[in-house]
Image (cartoon, coloured by chain):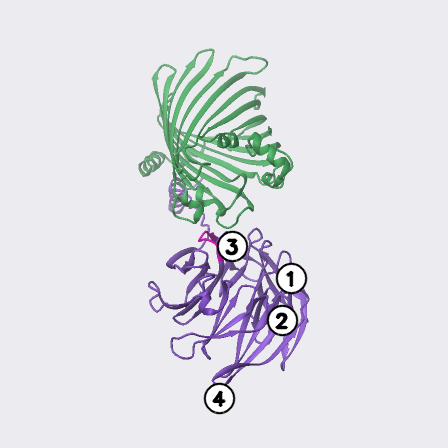
Amino acid sequence: MIVINIRMKHCLNLFIIATIFSCIEPNSENLWKLNEVVHIETEGYCRDVYISGDSVFVAAGQGGVQLWDISTITAPYLLWKKSLAELGVNKEITQVTYASSIKQLFALESNERPLHIDLSSGDSASVQGQFSSEKTKEFRVVTNHENSFTVYAADNDDGLKLSTFEYDTGFELWFNTAGDEIASFGNPNGIDIYENEIVLTLDQLGIEAFHSENGIITSSYQIDLKGNARAVTMLNGSEFYIACEDAGAFKLTIGISGQTEAKIQFAKDLFVTHIAVSNNQLALSCASNGLALYEPDGNTTISARGIHDIGYVYHAEFSGGYLFAATREGLQIFEIEE
Amino acid sequence: MRFFAIILLSILWGQTWTDYLQSPVKWTVGFTNGYDNNVLRLSAIEKDDAALNQTILGGTKTFDSHYVRFSLSGLKKIQLDDREKQIQFFAKSNLSNYIQYKHRQYWSGYVKVSYHWGAYRRLEYMLRHLDNYYMRHYKDLDITVNQLFPCNFTDREQRILISHPIKLRLWLTGSISYTQRYYDRSFTEFDSDIFTTTFKVSKKFRDFGTISLEVLYGIADNITFGKGAKSSNLDRSYRHTELYLPFSYDQGMLGFEAVGFSLRTDFRQYEVEDISDPLHSGRSHRETKFDIWGKKNVKKNLMISCTIRLRNRFTDSHYDWVSELKSFDQIHAWISIEWKMLYDRY
């Protein structure tokens, strides 16, 4: 004889009720939303953006260079702009970088030479001229001290090109006092620097890394990658993301002796031209496909968090909790909602 | 539904547990061997495309597949004090495996609790589950441009059904059901809650068979419309109407003890009217399934059935290419063997 005690009775009750009310929950796609904060019309294509505090420098393509104030993020206003004619160049501006400690602005005329603009005297922008060599694809500026800086350029003709400038207090001018040229394995089209490590992207030939020690720069290793390596974003001296155009993107981890410890390919079917990194968020500039968000889950996987069709995206940067996207449609500022 | 549960429990507690636990349990083990000539429901155009680009097939090399299905069901009848009244518990579970399509391996099943208070008088609650059913590979436009991912969905249906006689051997059946059709992570933009009502009239002819006519009307609400990423910007809600006409003849024919056929026609109209999206805008389809079957009892407890199903979907659209892309034909054929057993511990 089976004895049904009170506990069994309750269990049976629970089972029947749970069965009757057993709805299922939808799956979560785990995608991130892009909430637009503001959309700035930049006249020309917005090719690049550099954020320094409340100042946003814009490479506005054929619109030249612009400086926007974003102290009120929802209502940015234009502080000044320099047209191509005022800058003394003919081709569009594709990159801007600002060295805040010495108040010097740098811009790149497309496939030509970098421009040097002095912002140290108030709000006026004084064009100092162009330097380095033609066919510069991208550059980085390292401030040596308050009167000196060095520009590292990915020179598509010659390899890695260095130009050191020093400020002469007597003439109150910046003079190009030193320079160097280090041949690379292929023709570089992108560059990034982390402390003493420099990485160039070499288009079809992947990447090449250099090490700088006591002013002497030597090639460390070269890694071939699928696709066309276009831009590199370094996390530190041994970890970096590479945008490889139609092969998507790679995350590389390099060992002490220069061997590849880990290589993760992601966004394989996207045309990736640049990768911006902020903690666990990656923003991939994907040209006409817009902006793709990814999340590195750990050591081995990088998960897609959504493609956002915001126009033709050239470049993106994280700053102050916002994502700045340089697009053909202008500069767009977003917040990412995870 | 709460009231239904309370009524059921009240009836059960009206007599001692040991009384109704003494009834036997009828078990049935089934095995189905089948063939599907168009697993992915590809149109003729898609089949031509697949010859050049096999990614649409999700890693397989054929359009058709052999499949097997195991099933196990159990029925327990609880006779109440009143001899005309009884409660039945029925559960069935299936495990299906498409041999040529490794993605289509899934289980399904349902449980039914019904209260009977006379001939053709029945109140029934059913809970059905279809787990991770693979449709085909689609693009996940939220995270990719042209990469294909397997698209699976899970169904959970709850249905309440009532049946009542009108005249001798003529009865009506009505039901309402709520189905949650939720897709896996890559395709949540298709998630829908489907409310369905059915109305069926059946007539059993002595020494002949049974014929029924069922009308079904359903509304599918695309619950993720506008709530997700860009792919959810399209409303995939739809309404559908279905006519179902089953007929069975139980006096023996062609060596079978019973034979029958059924005709099911479904008309589905999508609600989206977006001119910029010709693939979905103003689209509707008419689907017809024609089944013909025969059953034979090889032994008293061993039954074999054979079924052939012809299926056709015709898609109507303002655009001819959409009609051609979304229309397909399919043939199913299967043989099932069922072995009935009785478990009676008393």
Are circles 3 and 2 on residues that touch, CB within 8 Å?
A: no
Magenta-span inclusion, residue A223: no
* Horizontal and vertical percent position of residue A89: 50, 67
Amino acid type of disc 1? Gly
Callout 2 environment at 10 Å: few (<14), some (14 to 19), or many (20+)?
Answer: many
Residue A184 in sight here: yes
- Magenta range: A306-313
Split into 4 quadrants, where in the image is the C terminus of chain A? Answer: bottom left
Callout 1 environment at 10 Å: few (<14), some (14 to 19), or many (20+)?
Answer: many
Amino acid type of disc 4? Gly
Looking at the image, is mark 2 or mark 4 earlier in the sequence? 2
Q: Which residue is mark 3?
A: A287
Q: Which mark is residue A160?
A: 2
Q: Which mark is residue A170?
A: 4
- Chain letter for mark 2, please: A
Amino acid type of disc 2? Leu
Residue nearest the viewer, comparing B319 with A147: A147
Q: Which residue is mark 1?
A: A206
The residue sitting at the top extreme is B207
Residue nearest the viewer, comparing B81 with B115: B115
> For the residue labelled by badge 3, is the local secondary structure a helix, a strand or a loop?
loop
Q: What hue represents chain A?
A: purple
